[in-house]
Image (cartoon, helix red, strand yellow):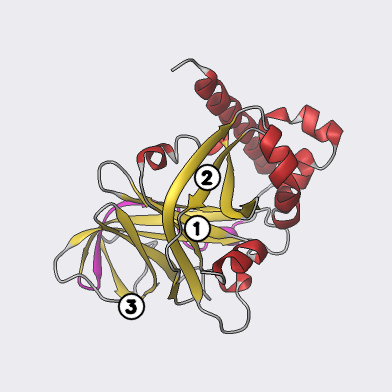
Amino acid sequence: MTEFVPLWRRAITAEVCWIDHEGHPCALAATPVLDQGTPAVALPYSRAYQIAGLRSATSVAFAVTDSRSLRGDRQGLVSVGIPEIIDDLDGDHFTVELLKQELIKYPPSRTLADSPLLCRENWWWLPRIIVRLRRREQPESTAPRTNPERHALLVRPEGIRPRVSVVELTGNASADGDAVRLGNLAQPDPVPGTALLFGHDYSMPDLERWESWSLRGTLDGDLLGVERRTGEPGALARPLRLLDRLRRQRALQRECVRGIREHEKPR
């Protein structure tokens, strides 16, 4: 238990996994921070829709699997607990308790909130959805992801609890085929079941690009029958033009403002 917090403190990136109310496994990549000693992530409101299902989840897994956040040949760690979600709509808690950690770990945030002037100008970046991991179980080890294009998290439901492990793609995930074969499966289920394959990669050392991809479908043995795809491995190979960067930031601002306004409405 004690080794997970130091790893979360020094990790650059992490993963958050849960099972939504329909029983579908979900995952996202985020910047790990400690909120008064508790493992947490502070998500901008541009991601409000993405984590809507997490609000009703009673179990969540926090994971550190990327080898760039691990020391030497250490294994990755997954800790499951109860999610506590706080809507910090004014951004006060994030600014005081968590912003400094994010500025160190996530350089793109420096262009938006690295001074009082920037914080006022980009006010929409400070309100956050803070997810804390409470009542953590003993962390479990998993293989590290040393190749972001070939290694991914496999998320499966174990009741309402997410079961997370790292697997290797032995086929082409970006192909148009309807099935992908996986290697190094830990305790494969004897019967087919729903599963999510989730991967992400980022540019170093600036993290200007941080791209995720996923394959959702039915896992039968070591074969994932793909029903839905988002993104694709290797997306970092395509550089962004200046115009693309400007459009991306404008889209981020619009999505943050939309998410903030939506959650400010009386419920």
| Picture layout, residue 71 above or below residue 133 | below
- Measured along the vertical axis of the image, is residue 46 above or below residue 172? above
Q: Which residue is mark 3?
A: 183
Residue 104 sits above or below residue 263 on the image:
below
Q: Secondary structure at mark 2?
A: strand
Q: Quadrant of residue 248?
A: top right
Q: Left or right of 60: which side holds 263?
A: right
Q: Earlier in the sequence, mark 1 or mark 2?
A: 1
Discs 3/2, front = 2
Tag 2 residue: 131
**Distance of label 1 from label 2 (alpha carbons):** 12 Å
Q: Position of residue 235 (x, y in %)?
A: 53, 58
Is 31 magenta? The answer is no
Q: Residues within 10 Å of mark 1 (few under 14, many from 20)?
A: many
Amino acid type indicated by mark 1:
Glu
Residue at the spot x=48%, y=43% of the render?
84
Question: Residue placed farthest to the bottom in the image?
Answer: 73
Report the span colored magenta.
Answer: 221-238
The answer to whether marks 1 and 2 mark residues whose Cβ atoms lie closer than 8 Å is no
Residue 63 x, y percent position in the rendering: 49, 63
State which tag comes first along the sequence, 3 or 2: 2
Indicate the position of residue 143 as horizontal and vertical percent values. 45, 77
Residue type at mark 3: give it: Gly
Crowding around mark 2 (Cα neighbors within 10 Å: few <14, some 14 to 19, many 20+) is: many
Q: Which residue is mark 1?
A: 15
Q: Amino acid at mark 2?
A: Val
N-term mark: 1 or 3: 1
